[in-house]
Image: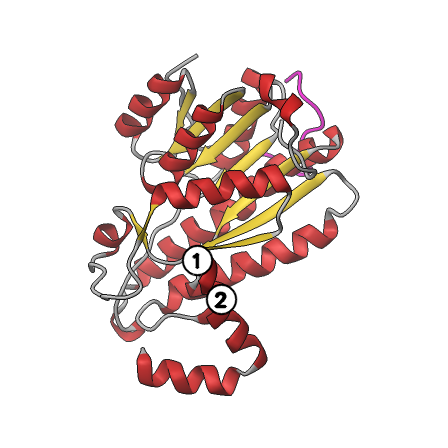
């Protein structure tokens, strides 16, 4: 490999990453960056928020895009629209994080932006949840992201620049009834974002945690239960993509989408007893 430095530790977990097609930093982007911003890797890009982020970055121009997802057909169709590199792979497979890292660096030489948006859910009582779904949600929503960031981060630190965007959920901020494991995984991702941001201070690498509420994507169909609340209404995935771009441009640490969702999270933080009382009665 020509790229440097390699992540520490042995790479002894093989897994498939295939391709089908041929600079952001901790500081805010300036107008002068538009001509060539660098390389962006978007996971979960075959649908939903990830696909919307890919479209948003392509619309901005100047990015070399690498798109990852598990639906190879949809991913390749999206990548073809933007002359992007499609890298279909299941990042929960052992070693897929290392192989994807090698692929990105071998093809582009560097990574300037990672948007980790892959996620799955499950709705229902925890006691009725199949054990395999517990492993799947923790694997996709948390562990796969941790392993991928671990593989990519040394290269960003060595370059002295880069930005990591982690797509969380309001479920991780307040806990959502009927989504206990999903809430737990997203809460862990939030803590990871905070801890990593402190660790990377003065390295030139930024960390943004984007926290959406309900988003109008196939997520609810795939979790096995539709979204039935009349309020709050789901927001379009494009609104989350806009928030991601704004956060990267302005170097924001944390963004709620929509912004008012910060209020219940703050109530829970300063008055947890009141929040739990309200949540128990209002759902």
Q: Going 59% across and 61% down the picture, which residue do you hit?
A: 191
Q: Nearer the viewer, residue 34 or 227?
A: 34
Residue holding disc 1: 169
According to the picture, the residue beneath numbered tag 2 turns out to be: 173
Label for residue 126?
Answer: none
Q: Quadrant of the C terminus?
A: bottom left
Instruction: Tell me if residue 76 comes above or below residue 237 in the rendering.
Output: above
Residue 273, image x, y percentages: 50, 87
Residue 106 % position (x, y) = 57, 18
State left or right for residue 30 relative to residue 95: right
Q: Callout 2: helix, strand or loop? A: helix
User: As rendered, which of 278 and 155 lies closer to the eye?
Assistant: 278
Vertical side of 110 occupied by 234: above or below: below
Quarter of the picture containing the N terminus is top right
Q: Is residue 2 found left or right of 277 in the rendered image? A: right
Q: Residues within 10 Å of mark 1 (few under 14, many from 20)?
A: many
Badge 1 element = loop
Q: Residue at left 28%, top 59%?
A: 233
Q: CA distance from mark 2 to mark 1?
A: 7 Å
Q: Quadrant of residue 77?
A: top left
Compared with 239, 60 (above or below) is above
Magenta range is 1-11
């Amino acid at each position: 490999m020509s790229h440097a430095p390699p992540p520490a530790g042995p790479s002894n977990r093989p897994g498939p990453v295939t391709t089908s097609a041929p600079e952001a930093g901790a500081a805010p982007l300036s107008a002068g960056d538009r001509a060539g911003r660098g390389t962006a890797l978007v996971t979960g890009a075959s649908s939903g928020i990830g696909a919307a982020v890919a479209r948003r970055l392509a619309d901005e121009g100047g990015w070399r895009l690498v798109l990852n997802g598990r639906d190879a057909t949809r991913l390749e169709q999206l990548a073809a629209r933007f002359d992007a590199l499609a890298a279909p792979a299941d990042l929960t497979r052992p070693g897929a994080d290392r192989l994807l890292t090698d692929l990105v660096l071998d093809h582009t030489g560097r990574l300037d932006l990672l948007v980790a948006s892959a996620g799955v859910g499950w709705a229902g009582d925890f006691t009725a949840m199949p054990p395999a779904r517990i492993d799947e949600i923790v694997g996709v929503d948390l562990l796969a992201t941790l392993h991928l960031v671990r593989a990519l981060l040394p290269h960003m630190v060595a370059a002295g620049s880069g930005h990591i965007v982690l797509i969380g959920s309001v479920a991780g901020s307040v806990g959502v009834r009927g989504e206990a494991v999903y809430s737990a995984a997203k809460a862990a991702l939030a803590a990871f974002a905070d801890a990593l941001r402190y660790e990377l201070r003065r390295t030139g690498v930024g960390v943004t945690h984007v926290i959406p509420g309900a988003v109008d994507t196939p997520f609810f169909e795939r979790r096995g239960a539709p979204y039935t609340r009349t309020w709050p209404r789901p927001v379009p995935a494009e609104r989350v993509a806009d928030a991601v771009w704004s956060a990267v441009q302005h170097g924001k640490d944390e963004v709620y989408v929509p912004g008012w969702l910060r209020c219940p999270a703050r109530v829970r933080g300063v008055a947890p007893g009141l929040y739990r009382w309200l949540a128990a009665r209002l759902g």
